[in-house]
Amino acid sequence: MALSASDLGTIYSLLTNSMSGDESVRKPAEAALSQFESRPGFCSCLMEVITAADLASQVDVRLLASVYFKNSINRYWRNRRDSAAISSEEKNHLRQKLLSHLREENDKIAGLLAVLISKIARLDYPREWPELFSVLANKLQSADVLTSHRIFLILFRTLKELSTKRLTVDQRNYAEITSHLFGYSWGLWQSDVQAILNSFSTLAQSYTSNALEQRHDELYLMSERWLLCLKIIRQLIISGFPSDSKCVQEVQPVKEVSPILLKAIQSFLPYYSSFQKGHPKFWDFIKRACTKLMKVLVTIQGRHPYSFGDKSVLPPVMDFCLNKITDPDPYILSFEQFLIQCMVMVKCVLECKEYKLNLTGRVMDESVITVEQMKKNISNAVGGVLTSLLPSERIIHLCNVLIRRYFVLTASDLEELYQNPESFHHEQDMVQWTEKLRPCAEALYIVLFENHSQLLGPIVVSILQEAMNACPTSVTEITPGLLLKDAAYGAAAYVYYELSNYLSFKDWFNGALSLELSNDHPNMCVIHRKVALILGQWVSEIKADTKRPVYCSLIRLLQDKNLSVKLAACRSLCLHVEDANFSEQEFLDLLPICFDSCFKLVEEVQEFDSKVQVLNLISVLIGHVHEIVPFANKLVQFFQKVWEEASGESLLQIQLLIALRNFVVELGYQSPTCYNVLLPILHGGIDINSPDILNLLEDGMLLWEATLSHAPAMEPRLLAYFPCLVEIMERSFDHLQVAVNIMEDYIILGGTEFLRMHASSVAKVLDLIVGNVNDRGLLSTLPIIDILVQCFPAEVPPLISSTLQKLIMICLSGRDDFEPSKAAVKASAAAILARILVMNTNYLAQLTAEPSLSLLLQQADIPIEENILLCLVDIWLDKIDNASSDQKKTFGLALSIILTLRLPQVVDKLDQILRCSFKFEFWYHLLQLLSMTYTRFMSFNSCSVCTSVILGANDDLTEEESSGDNMSSSKFHGEGIIPSREYRKRQIKFSDPIKRWSLENSVRENLQTCATLHGESFNSAISRMHPAAFAQLKQALKMP
């Protein structure tokens, strides 16, 4: 039943009660509102609550009504099959009501109403709401300041929402909106900025803060409207025109707007200092306005670089930004957000690919100028402008300023370094470069150096040398010289790759960096931290003869008294251990003290990011240094403690699971020594009911796989975890390949005991996978079914009958002629069914005769014209060329068994069956002959490769015969004592009865049985064979 005006009181009461602190009141109200929201008229009632004049003071209730309205738009505005949509009549009423309530005085509710209109516009404009922008434009003509502010708020939200629609028709609609709105918005913005500047001039001259108090609110509202108008202009320029970097069409508003935006910045900036004390509200506006204006210029340059590159735009903007960076007014130095945007602008221009000089020419006498040629012409022109803007002297000056002014630590930085070194480390090294002044200056410096490395390389080296000479390693006081040396060290660290052409790391390390570490004064933490950074950044330039002292230095820094130094050393050590040229031999004796230092550091640090960083180093050490066994007990205790303390910190737990996986791999078959700690942690990472399972599952399953792969025998506790795999697969197939590997490990390790305990779970997992994953997933899973059938031919087929029925459906379905993946799936599925026929003949005959299978085939529209088993015979005959060598023999044995069936159709297929059997025998003997021949001249492994290449086999026949150098994945832990996973897998393959059975004998014996069963029809079929083929067959089968 639809809600009406009579239900307003009920809705209002429910909204009020849903904000109650009493749960017994709140819960029923929320439940009732949830029931009401799908009923017609609910949104209309909410709209009445929002706009009711007598409820103006009930801000919380109106805000909640706005939120429910927004959620209802998301759920019920668009017609859906699963829910009743809002009627067209109610939609029309709501749209009119929203546009009639524009003068909302509460800022939060006005913002929500703007969001509501934008969301409806995304769905209804222009088809159901074509008058939206014309109505708003008309209302603007006679609006007061408040109403116009709200209209611009609505316009901004709506334009921002519509800009995310990327279809061509939507972009055309947006371009049309731009053509109508831009002129008016731009005109209003210009008139407003002049009015605001005039008012600011008067305000700055007034000596009493309340002289113009009655006009302050109106002025502030006009200023906020002006900011909204600026955002609208930005949105129209960015989204209303295609990027000129693609279409090479000049965007005229860029050339019109950008110079005036720059002029506005220049006009507003002087008020930054004059308003700071007397008018804090307008001082805050000045900060936001100047920063936003620069951000708009940065955005326009990124969207329309060619238009922005015009001589009327780029030179004045770049010149202004460079001047503010290198020669700022004193008050600008405290205006960090503005300086950051100036640096961002310069950085964006310097690395803009559209401005790079293009030295390629074009074909002579080419009359038509292509788009690419136009781009080259513009790029070269802009490149010339930049060259004139940035002569060598200015580039060197900018580099000097960045290093000597912006890289130098401030008094507040030093206080933070001493008082809270951990936070200082993360703020300096992990913060976004656009958020803080020093990281932004560093990013600009790196781009500047990359563009002008030949010019700046000697300059940076000279600054470095000057700083080191002015501040010897014995200095302990925090002097300007020491801070400059810290800045110079940073400058050398950030551009290590290019600077290595001008600076020898070995000489620098021996002559200065290593000496810095001999000074243990607490103030030296400033320099020690930067030395740790340098040792990590320059890792690729450190030669073999310097590695050992560098490793020792980093270990020493890891034991520094200051946490920021320790964490910097921790990060640099990670870079060294992960380096391709890491010298394990040089590092080995440092491992005990490195682990002990890491364990202590985890105890010292408090922040989450720090713990993750240290744990990452431990994980990297375990993964790259093989002598881990002596530290196993300490590591186990460490892992247990960290896991207990990391409850609820999923990122830390993930890092711990990664470290444990590396640990298990390195322990190899000694890993059971850590099971008491490992297995509970493992269970926490794979338990589907764990609150953090979404974050932990991937690494938990990888740890599970590693634990099984390196287990010497099946552990009862591990065996009990298998049902978790069922729950994981029921949830999703995101980790299918790892799940398949885990199941294979359970089969290989657990054997009969595993199947006895988890037969139903095995069947459930396979039934979940087969039929619900793509071809790639099936190709990963089918080998598991094949191993199961091989190991348990009597027990498994009845257990997985549902899965086998799906395999039969896969085999008998078509659509694989032009899809190699489907052909491979069908061949593998057919090979499994052939194996069952060979090893459990009666069961396959029973399975193919079941009425349920016929019903499934019928429901899947798979036509069956004869016995299902005979249909499989056709598949085996058809897919034998797609099969591997082992599968071909399985097909041959299965086909030979078919000869013993009392079905007259067998005789009709006799010629094909015998030809396939003979073909396999021929290739099998040829493979053996080639293998024997090659063995005389090369190693067994090489023979395997060559034979496979020559014959083009899908699967290496001799791969299984090769003794393999990698039979043990844990060769460091007693190879040959405990058989490896791969060795066990090979043993299972070697013990395959199909390998031992003779296809020749099987065909000969079953051919005789076929002759006895079918008599004259058999003889008739034989007589129809080609004489030459019959003779070859007799020879192959050694028949008289």
Image (spheres, helix red, strand yellow):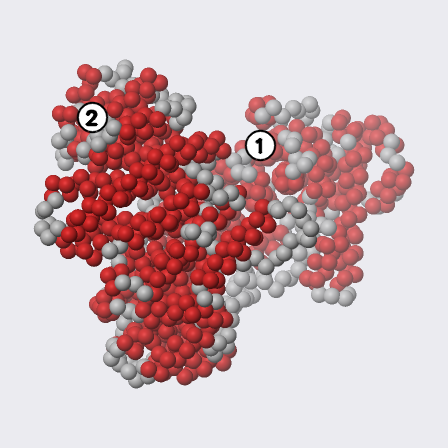
Q: Residue at x 42, y 42 (%)?
A: 253
- Nearer to us in this view, 733 or 902: 733
Does residue 302 appear to the left or right of 143 in the view shown?
right
For residue 517, which quarter of the picture? bottom left
Q: Residues within 10 Å of mark 2 (few under 14, many from 20)?
A: some
Q: Is residue 246 visible?
A: no
- Please state, as top left, top right, bottom left or bottom right, where the C terminus lies in the image: top right
Q: Residue at x 65, y 38 (%)?
A: 819
User: Disc 2 and disc 1: Cα gap in Å?
Assistant: 64 Å
- Please state, as top left, top right, bottom left or bottom right, where the N terminus lies in the image: top left
Total marks shown come to 2
Does residue 970 appear to the left or right of 6 in the view shown?
right
Checking the image for residue 532, the label placed there is none
- Decide: marks 2, 1 in contact (CB < 8 A)? no
Kindly identify which residue carries mark 1: 805
- Nearer to us in this view, 643 or 212: 212
Relative to 353, is 603 above or below? below
Where is residue 930? Give x, y as percent.
78, 57
Q: Secondary structure at mark 1?
A: helix
Does residue 606 appear to the left or right of 929 in the view shown?
left
Q: Secondary structure at mark 2?
A: helix
Nearer to us: label 2 or label 1: 2
Which residue type carries mark 1? Answer: Gln
Kindly identify which residue carries mark 2: 51
- Nearer to us in this view, 697 or 265: 265
Q: Earlier in the sequence, mark 2 or mark 1?
A: 2
- Nearer to us in this view, 549 or 701: 549
Q: Residue at x 82, y 44 (%)?
A: 1037
